[in-house]
Amino acid sequence: MDESPKKELAVRRNTSSHLHRKEETPSWHLGAPVDIFFRSSPCRIVVVNAQELDHPIIYVNLIFEQVTGYRADEVLGRNCRFLQYQGSFAKTRYPLVDIRILTEICRCLSEGFDFEGERLNFRKGGSPLMNRLYIKPICNDEGIITHFLGVQSFKEANFDLSPLRGLVWKKSSGAIHTHILGDMYSQKSLFVHRDCSFKKCCPLYKVSDEVLVVNILARLTPKDVTSLGSVCHRFYNLTKDESLWKLVCQNIWGQETFSILESVARRRRLWWGKIVRELTTLEAAAWRKLTVGGSVEPSCINFSVCAVGSKVVLFGGEGVNMQPVNDTFVLDLNEDCPEWTHINVNSAPPGRWGHTLSGLSDSRLVVFGGCGRNGLLNDAFVLDLDEPQPTWREVSCSTRPLPRSWHSSCILDGTKLIVSGGCTDSGALLSDTFLLDLTMEKPVWKEINVSWRPPSRLGHTLSVLGNHKILMYGGLATSGPLRLRSSDVYIMDLSEEETRWKYVTGSMLPGGVSTCNSAPPPRLDHAAVSLPGGRVVVFGGSIAGSRLETKVYILDPMEEKPTWRILYVQGRQPKYASGHSTCLVGGTRVVVLGGHHTEDWMLTELHELCLINLKGTD
Amino acid sequence: MAEDPTAAMAKECKVRLKISDDTIFEVEYAVAMQSQMLKNALSDTGTDGTVPLHNISSEIMAKVVEYCAYHVNAANTISEKDVKIWDQEFLKDLDQATLFNLIMATQYMVIHNLQDLICQTVADRIKDKSAEEVREIFNIQNDLTPEEEEEIRHENQWAFEEEGWPEIQEEVRLEG
């Protein structure tokens, strides 16, 4: 940002102290919030040496001296924590100083993030100051943090500083974020003797924040937790607690989703409160264009992709002269400049197109079926990307489902491959469903027997809901002597003793929820993605009349009457949206590649539907 | 020791718990073992002495013992469905203060199943309630100024909308 104010300060001399002169000039890049501090009120500036033990102060400005009463020569070489002691003779931190803010500061400093927040400080004489603090790490040219810059503006704090008898709830003037606590996470905070004049009729005051957050609030939905913010100050502050949102996420979306999101959150420095909110409301959903390096050559169409961690894996496809290929490519989206890399694998499966590729838990993936050089296939191969020499291994089974292409598949529980429908060699459509449990030493294909099957189809999608349900949507389905695009939704609960397909909504069958105006038109070759919470998002595909399908639809099967809704998504959608391959990477980005009529044969221009705002804290 | 000490203890021992008003609760070893905290304490000191639990009142202790005693017996003998019915009966007439005191007690004594039961009950009471209703339920005073309330409501607008996601505002433009 604007570099001149900081350079000016670096030069300014504090007449009453001796400055420690730095050997090298760090690069000063300050962002907007610091600029606002400079302009709003006289600011105290503190610079500490990040590379020395206990982060000693190396510079303070005149305002610091004037406001705090401490002279520069009294504080140079010390850590800033003396500001939390009430006066110069105190030996320990004043109990009203918010421990959580301090832990947050420590966390930010150790991880190299900016910190912004409010904190209780004391002048040398012992009078309190409410300190609005902004800490920024300063890096040298090699990106190593060498110093921390602290910019502080202050306001007077109105506190009763008489000896405390226990926890009290008080609000300092104007600061809605201030939260005064004792030692939050210790056992002794569970039983406190309250100041009798203070709300003894409210039983919640006996319960500590930790107990409230971990045991009660964490059980609520994001919506409930958020609306609790309007109850009172205490609740509002609790809804700002990141650990609460992490627990809420774990509870409602499961440990697996939480782990996936955690790696994204850590990498991009996202606030959990925001992640949970955006994944619930999808208000930040946006189409983005993604340009990557490398290329997929020989170029092909009708390949299949899946996500493994942060990587997109591509296998097979129809190459030149309609010949099936069997190359494996990987694109790692965690890299700064992602590029397609061809993986040299051992024993690649026979080339194919119209197959399915699905990601298992850990770093493994499985391919099934498709159209090979000599007809349709029904073999399954597994690849472990983390092996030093990745090797495709065939899953040997005595009995297999019928060979097929354009079927759909999904992975249940990270370990079971489910395959349904598709087209056989003779051109007939299938309506069966098979399950392959890959945790077994000798996996066996098991047909899921149901009393009634939906009409046979190809080009449909199977999505997983939670741990034990699957949802089938769309496709080109048999309807008497015809084959018509379908808009039907079926769900199967595999934990039930008598598994069966339940018809949810659509247009073909009586019963189910009747469709409304925002129902998607029937389609095949579309993309369907499962979101946390068991919702399904659908877009693209081939619809009747060769109109280009532009809208994104969302369905929540958990509702009493599941209804399709149109999801508003910012940005420009991919123009060609049929027959593409999609996968959900990191729980937050739907990557879209290929597709019919695309001109991007090299797959260097991808589209992604970002479900949340992936830019870090601003 | 050759024989399993815990089995012998379970049959015969009583554990003595001294609570806030200095009364002594005598509970069976198996019942006391429902509390992880007691389990740890007794494995160090044995069952001869008295375990002080100054923070818990007799009323609350009675409830805790009632629950633990039932669940020790029910463990292998009573069906899950019946246990759930008993649990609901147990909770039925408990007032707010007792509920929260029980939460504190189970946190301190580390009794997971009772704590889960009560916390889930409290969470269920808050579910889908407006802020005003939550205040009424827990007798919380609203210490937010009208300006603060307005600001918070604005910040959390999405939680007050009927549906979870915004309506479509405009057609999504195609890539040119």
Image (cartoon, coloured by chain):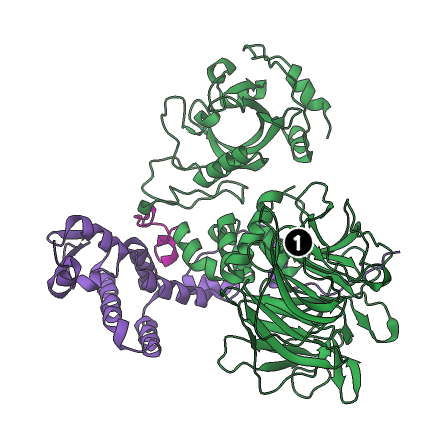
Q: In the rendered view, does A146 fall on the left or right side of A70? A: right
Mark 1 residue element: loop
> Which chain hosts label 1?
A
Q: A107 or A172: which is nearer to us?
A: A107
| Coordinates of residue A440 in the picture (x, y in percent) | 49, 66
Residue numbers of the magenta segment: A189-208
Q: B150 or A151: which is nearer to us?
A: A151
Residue at 73% across, 72% down: A376
In the displayed structure, A100 sits above or below A427; it is above
Residue at 47% across, 58% down: A218
Chain A: its colour in the image is green
| Coordinates of residue A331 in the picture (x, y in percent) | 70, 49
Instruction: Indicate the quadrant where residue A477 lies.
Output: bottom right
In the displayed structure, A175 sits above or below A448; it is above
Residue at 47% across, 50% down: A234
Location of the C terminus of chain A (image quadrant): top right
| Coordinates of residue A161 in the picture (x, y in percent) | 39, 35
Question: Does A193 appear in magenta?
Answer: yes
Q: A216 or A331: which is nearer to us?
A: A331
- Let me know if residue A547 appears in the view: yes
Where does label 1 land, which residue?
A612
- Let me know if residue B24 appears in the view: no
Chain B: its colour in the image is purple
Q: A185 or A482: which is nearer to us?
A: A482
In the displayed structure, A147 sits above or below A428; it is above
Q: Amino acid at mark 1?
A: Ile
| Coordinates of residue B83 in the picture (x, y in percent) | 31, 75
Location of the N terminus of chain A (image quadrant): top right
Question: Does A531 appear in magenta?
Answer: no
Marker count (numbered): 1
